[in-house]
Image (tube, coloured by chain):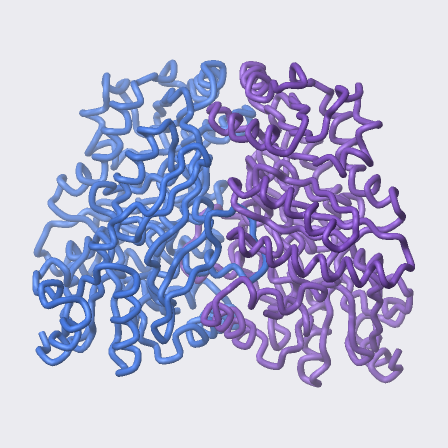
Chain colours: A purple, B blue
Amino acid sequence: MSSAVASDLAGLVGSEHVRHDAHFLADASQAMGLRGEAAAVVLPGDAAEVAAVVAWCYERGVAVVPRGGGTGYAGGAVPLDPAHVVLALDRLDRVRSFEPGLWRMEAEAGVTTQTVARLARENGLVFPPDPGAAEQSHLGGNIATNAGGPHCFKYGVTRAWVSGVEAVIAPGELVRFGGPLRKDVAGYDLTGLLCGSEGTLGIVTSAWLRLLPAPQLQLPVVGAFAGVEEGCEAIERVLASGVVPATIEYLDAGALAASASTFPGGLPDGTAFLVVCEADTSEADAAELEEALAGELGRALRPSARELWRWRDGVSLAVTARRGGKLSEDVAVPLDRLAAGITGTVAIAERHGLEGCSWGHAGDGNLHSTFLLEPGDTEQLARAEAAVEELFALAIALGGSVSGEHGLGWLKRGQLRNQWAPAAVGAHEAIKAALDPKGLFNPGKKTA
Amino acid sequence: MSSAVASDLAGLVGSEHVRHDAHFLADASQAMGLRGEAAAVVLPGDAAEVAAVVAWCYERGVAVVPRGGGTGYAGGAVPLDPAHVVLALDRLDRVRSFEPGLWRMEAEAGVTTQTVARLARENGLVFPPDPGAAEQSHLGGNIATNAGGPHCFKYGVTRAWVSGVEAVIAPGELVRFGGPLRKDVAGYDLTGLLCGSEGTLGIVTSAWLRLLPAPQLQLPVVGAFAGVEEGCEAIERVLASGVVPATIEYLDAGALAASASTFPGGLPDGTAFLVVCEADTSEADAAELEEALAGELGRALRPSARELWRWRDGVSLAVTARRGGKLSEDVAVPLDRLAAGITGTVAIAERHGLEGCSWGHAGDGNLHSTFLLEPGDTEQLARAEAAVEELFALAIALGGSVSGEHGLGWLKRGQLRNQWAPAAVGAHEAIKAALDPKGLFNPGKKTA
């Protein structure tokens, strides 16, 4: 690392907070071989120090790569140039205020997803977004990617639960947009614009969160089907039932091959497609879901919520474990194209001599389309990368998006121009240029 | 009107669609004396014609003022320069697609709020945002102001229910952001940015809406209190009850003076503050709300939903009727500052020798703070305008916003810089400059 930059930054945050640990140079995309390099890794102690670091860098033309818990799959937190500075938000880990009676919390960017969830739960509340890796991922990272999760089908993604942000914007100014208030149309929606901007427009240092009383019930209802078509028909029956499930998840045959054996209570023989709903309002709603999901493999299953979601959390790792590696994307499609996305994933895999599968947030049309890999097999990896390009093209052809919840990061850079018309891409780029005129916030990421 | 501009635009949309009706030059802000002037009023027949008109204007440096139903209170749709062109979206009134089973609709900007609501209701669904003036207001206007309404307490404002927009952006390009899909983090959130942008960044021509199965119940529960403090304490008891009401509305003593006599079934003697909740999940929730709202004036009231909401819709007009006029703003504050906002409104009025009152969306901290006026009394109007300045300062001092749902429009221009720090205002202005480099989309509106 560059000692000159590191030593100047040490003057701003303290030398013990300029770090060299290799883990700050990679995120969950390292499974794809992505590792970075940087001039320095700094861990500011508070928002004012974040502003000081950004101001120092912005003045000198030094790029800043913000980093949360490092659980991103798209390489968004990986520094890609030895002159870049990683700004890790681990030390911004304070819950600044928590007023359960008013259903709200202000928490800093480095607070983990799990901490937010635990505090809410201990007070009879819930912060609805529930992305994976809750122990490690940070609130700031959730905001940077506008993270989702199973329960976002009913409750909406992170943006819907952030009523304001404190952020450092160019050239190093600490500002706030919104706050602990629930409605505000005075200025443009900068809060919303920062949500999902992947650290390319500014660095969120703290956020005001809306919370909700926890539902009194959590009643999973699972339908087991012989195939994709039957399962997707059942999903449409669920929608038509008039019940609003908290979740509508699915797993296809390939995902079940990796995970069915540990499903709590077991699955019926012949299960090749699973639909996982949850009612959180009443037993009557659960019964209606059960009726909608009862398919040719018999009655719907009713596992306990705790067992079910623990199992569901393990699906991604179980799929990885089959061959030791995987290339997984998070495309989204309109709900009526879900079956086409699922079968298309498998067909693309076959065309490239790969094993493909998917699972994900069916109700939101959000697939985790996955190609299994043997680690170290570079030829296989090259085929998987070609398959991913086809997958993106399929998602776009189906009227969907190359990313439902992970963002573009580094690995999907350049994909937006396949999805949006040139004038729309122009608007995306004009916003980047307007808010980051020197192009120093997480350069190369989320580029069209 | 300028005949040269009008005749060129007639070539684009047909001469019968270049209009001169005076009503296109004003909106609901005409009660405040605001009337506009314009070079032409054009009514394009479809999105392509909107793009053609904008392209023609943008090339020639002619400003465009988009117009929906004309129900805005902030003058956002009023043309303020004889060289401006009003682009009225009345003819974009098609519902392009409606798939009840998939809970979604695509509707053009000129479709009325009531039409969206009726189509949804006839199919067992609901489009949750419920701003006033539903017969006249347009979907495009709702999006332009990110409109709210009573039921947005539980369901969120318009933005939460718009999954994508088709829009004409500079220099006259028809683009789409998002679509009939529920998750998409590929590009920056341009859909969200256009929501609430009041036609200053582009013109929304169509939108993809998310719908929801209609709740099976609609059980209003109303608490009558002797004062603001008791009423606001009851609101906090409601939040603590664990029930999520669909609405938490309030009316203060002044608003009740205008409207109590027509409350369905009548109100208890001594009622000086009303809290209007609605349970839409179960009778048990309604009973809990009833318990939380039972105050010193006895048991909570249970009017029928139809009668209650018809009465509530009439409150604004009833308040106007007391003196013939009013100056009403829509400030928002954090919920724990609601009582301070309500009593502060009355105190400000008294200091200016006026009668003040408020009502609104209590759960969202959104006040319709109002000063009564005799029409034509310019000295009184001047005092009311001074009172409004104090009201905005109060909202900001309470950590709130000068606008919860109406936007800045023309009448609140310049207020954002009192609410946001200079660097935040700089970001607002940078976005405007980036997306509208010639400053031709609704100039002078929503300025900081």
Q: Nearer the viewer, residue A308 or B356?
A: A308
Q: Is residue A332 above or below residue A251?
A: below
Image quarter of the N terminus of chain B? bottom left
Q: Nearer the viewer, residue B226 or A408?
A: A408
Q: Nearer the viewer, residue B184 or A45?
A: B184
Q: Within the image, what quadrant is residue A202 found in? A: bottom right
| Residue ID at (34%, 17%) | B301
Left or right of B334, for residue A82: right
Image quarter of the C terminus of chain B? bottom left
On the question of residue B96 being in view, the answer is yes
Residue B127 position in % (x across, y down): 38, 37
| Residue ID at (82%, 77%) | A11
On the question of residue B393 being in view, the answer is no
| Residue ID at (63%, 48%) | A106
Residue B423 position in % (x across, y down): 53, 72
Left or right of A327, for residue B187: left
Q: Within the image, what quadrant is residue A122 found in? A: top right
